[in-house]
Amino acid sequence: MKVFVTGGSGYIGRATVEALVRRGIEVAALVRSDASERIVTGLGAGAVRGELTDVSVLRGAARAADGVLHLGQYAGTDAAEVDRAAAGAMQDGAGARPYVHTGGVWVYGDTAGIVDEDAPLNPPRLTAWRLENEKRVLARAATGERPVVVMPGLVYGRSAGLIETFYAAPGRAAGAVPCVGDGSNHWSLVHVEDLAELYVLALAAPAGSVYAGVSDRNPTALQVSEALSRAMGRPGAVRHLSMDEATERMGPVAEAFALDQQLTGARARRQLGWNPVRLDPLTELATHAAR
């Protein structure tokens, strides 16, 4: 089997390429630089030169593969348009073969308790654009194609990701870990290596499926900040930020960090046999975040 991966040199992508290669799956990863190529080839993948805006490259690479994992994220102001065109091109190339698209649980907004993939959608401004794109992706199931959407929770592990960027690193620099508001809101977490396993399994999922990539561990934001403070050797060193302060420091992602979310990944466990094993995020963050 050969799988085409976008975002293979990124945080989630590296773990996913590793998971594919461990299974003996041939991987072709999109790369836009020599540095990215060195990363993916070092993981055992082949490199396909191009960008998410190169729809002809994406279409051809998808056509040459047995399945596609779209993990890449475009950072420009036209992210919605680029993602929509990229997804369309790869689905055109994949045809009736698996196409796995990346969403995110933030589109559910505040969940008012534990919910699954069928919960109402109420995204923050940061991710509102995803709704139409994911609708278009999934609509192709009606034409005999095999789209699947994986919606990761807040990803942690390997001392990287959003928690490292917006919480651990600033905490080390300032001597106190930030926390938006009082921190009583919950976050749905998933370890990057568990999430990588879900992406691999999603290649065999039924057409039109949607899976929340969460490990059913929903600590409060304050608990996460406190764990990070322990990691840097200053237990309890947490600085609470108003929403205005958080937005000034973090940008629009602050609104997403303030969401109160509790989700379950039971559907993926039941349908795909997904078995997350990294189930103690607070201990791991308290132990490894300083590295």
Image: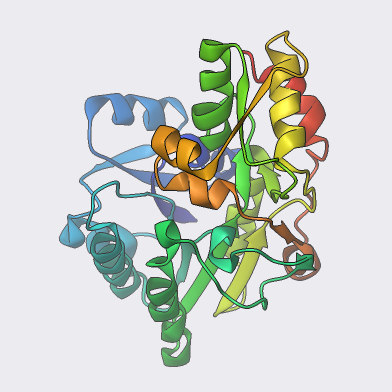
Q: Quadrant of residue 136?
A: bottom left
Using residue 74 as the reference point, say whether residue 277 is left or right of it.
Answer: right
Where residue 251 appears, x then y in whole percent? 39, 41
Where residue 264 appears, x then y in whole percent? 77, 62
- Residue 185 visible in the shown view: yes
Quick one: 127 or 147, which is closer to the camera?
127
The C terminus: image quadrant: top right
- Residue 285 visible in the shown view: no
Colour pattern: rainbow
Of all residues shown, which one is farthest toward the bottom? 142
Using residue 202 as the reference point, say whether residue 56 is left or right of it.
Answer: left
Q: Which residue is rendered at x = 40% and y = 36% of the image?
A: 248
Quick one: 68 or 101, which is closer to the camera?
101
Where residue 266 appears, x then y in whole percent? 79, 65
Q: Which residue is rendered at x = 28% and y = 57% of the image?
A: 79
Q: Quadrant of residue 212?
A: bottom right
Where residue 81 appears, x then y in whole percent? 24, 65
Using residue 89 as the reference point, say whether residue 69 is left or right of it.
Answer: right
Quick one: 2 or 13, which is closer to the camera?
13
Q: Quadrant of residue 118?
A: bottom right
Q: Which residue is rendered at x = 29% and y = 46% of the image?
A: 75
Is 190 above or below relative to 207? above
Is 83 above or below relative to 244? below
